[in-house]
Image (spheres, rainbow, N blue to C red):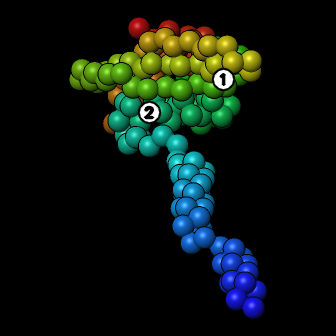
Amino acid sequence: MARRVHDVLMTQEAARPDRTLIAILSIIAAIVVIAFVVVFTRGGPADVDPATPEGVVQSYSRAMVASDYETARGFLSSDVLANCDRAEPNTIQGLRMTVISSKVNGDTAVVRVSMERGSGEFGGSGYTSEEAFTMVREGGLWKVISTPWELALCYNQGIGE
């Protein structure tokens, strides 16, 4: 009889889950959920003040990447628009830009950017180059005069310096 009571107690203990194991599994599940939340809720690049040369570069570039050429035209200087011999814009994919420097000299500005092109479908390495946007202030707003060739909307839009 004593052996039978001992067997019943052992069976009940074996059937009872280990609290340590449950705690560890709960912590792992919480970490996985937090990781998913972080990955899927991280935002894109911060918006830059559109009244600044850097903000104009960001807005113009976003419009070009989205193939929204009418919006992009709104960022071009009146001289470029008046003589615009429309270029056939490139399809731009996998482009990441980072502002390196911005120099304002009176009513002109030069924004230097690092342009990183995507790595390609088969994992090949991409490439990075330093390019420039040149702008002029018209009516209190910064307008684009020249861009990197990949982002040119007009042929007379000089290549960035």
> Which of the two residues, 79 or 103, is positioned nearer the viewer here?
103
Q: Quadrant of residue 7?
A: bottom right
Q: Check disc 1 and report the residue beneath it.
A: 92
Q: Are marks 1 and 2 in contact (CB under 8 Å)?
A: no
The x, y position of residue 98, in whole percent, is: 43, 26
> Which of the two residues, 85 or 75, is positioned nearer the viewer here?
75
Query: Residue shown at 49%/11% (left/top)?
Result: 129
The x, y position of residue 33, in whole percent, is: 59, 58
Q: Is residue 161 above or below residue 18?
A: above
Tell me if I can see residue 12 in this picture: no
Query: Residue shown at 56%/12% (left/top)?
Result: 127
Q: Check disc 2 and report the residue beneath it.
A: 56
Please identify the residue farthest to the left as the structure is shown: 106
The label shown at residue 151 is none
The x, y position of residue 51, in whole percent, is: 37, 40
- 146 sits left or right of 90 in the view: left
Position of the N terminus, as image quadrant, is bottom right
> Which of the two residues, 107 or 92, is positioned nearer the viewer here?
92
Tell me the distance, in whole angstroms, between the alpha carbons under discs 1 and 2. 18 Å
Q: Is residue 107 above or below residue 51?
A: above
**Which amino acid, mark 2?**
Val
Which label lies toward us, 1 or 2? Answer: 1
- 2 sits left or right of 64 in the view: right
Query: Residue shown at 49%/25% (left/top)?
Result: 97
- 155 sits left or right of 11 in the view: left
User: Secondary structure beneath disc 2?
Assistant: helix
**Which amino acid, mark 1?**
Ile
